[in-house]
Image (spheres, helix red, strand yellow):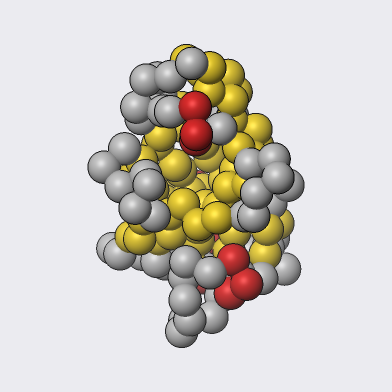
Amino acid sequence: QVQLVESGGGLVQAGGSLRLSCKASGGTASSYAMAWFRQAPGKEREFVAAINRNGGTTYYADSVKGRFGISRDNAKNTVYLQMNILKPEDAAVYYCAAEERYLGDKTASSWYHYWGQGTQVTVSS
């Protein structure tokens, strides 16, 4: 069973950048599709980005397309989320997720079996 630990969150001014990391342990990262979701206070958890096992295919929410980039280093069992041009509405707890199945909706939180504890991202205006 894989465990996921996020890091890299913090406080940043609007227009700034952050890079989140998600380290997987207890399993081989290359066996899992990985994704980032976020949840702001009072809102439902929403999809941000996903990446397939070898990093060759990525998916993005329209709200972050062109600003965020998801990547992975399977040798380090780590997935990254580079966040640029951050906006106040990007503020949320960001969660890393993993799933070992091949078929399914990679943008749906219900599809993912494994979750990290989350890392807080705060964007000041």
How many marks the image carries: the answer is 0
| Residue at x 35%, y 60% (from the top left corner) | 59
Q: Position of residue 70 (x, y in %)?
A: 38, 48
Residue 44 showing in the rendered view: yes
114 on left or right of 66: right
71 on left or right of 35: left
| Residue at x 37%, y 20% (from the top left corner) | 15
Q: Position of residue 83 (x, y in %)?
A: 40, 34
Residue 92, placed above or below residue 70: above
Q: Position of residue 117 (x, y in %)?
A: 73, 47
Residue 22, placed above or below residue 121: below
117 on left or right of 11: right
Q: Quadrant of residue 54?
A: bottom left
| Residue at x 40%, y 36% (from the top left corner) | 82
Residue most extreme to the bottom? 103
Residue 74 showing in the rendered view: no
25 on left or right of 69: right
Q: In the rendered view of the protein, which quadrant contains the N terminus?
A: bottom right
Residue most extreme to the front? 42
| Residue at x 28%, y 63% (from the top left corner) | 56
Q: Position of residue 85 (x, y in %)?
A: 34, 27
Q: Quadrant of residue 98?
A: bottom right
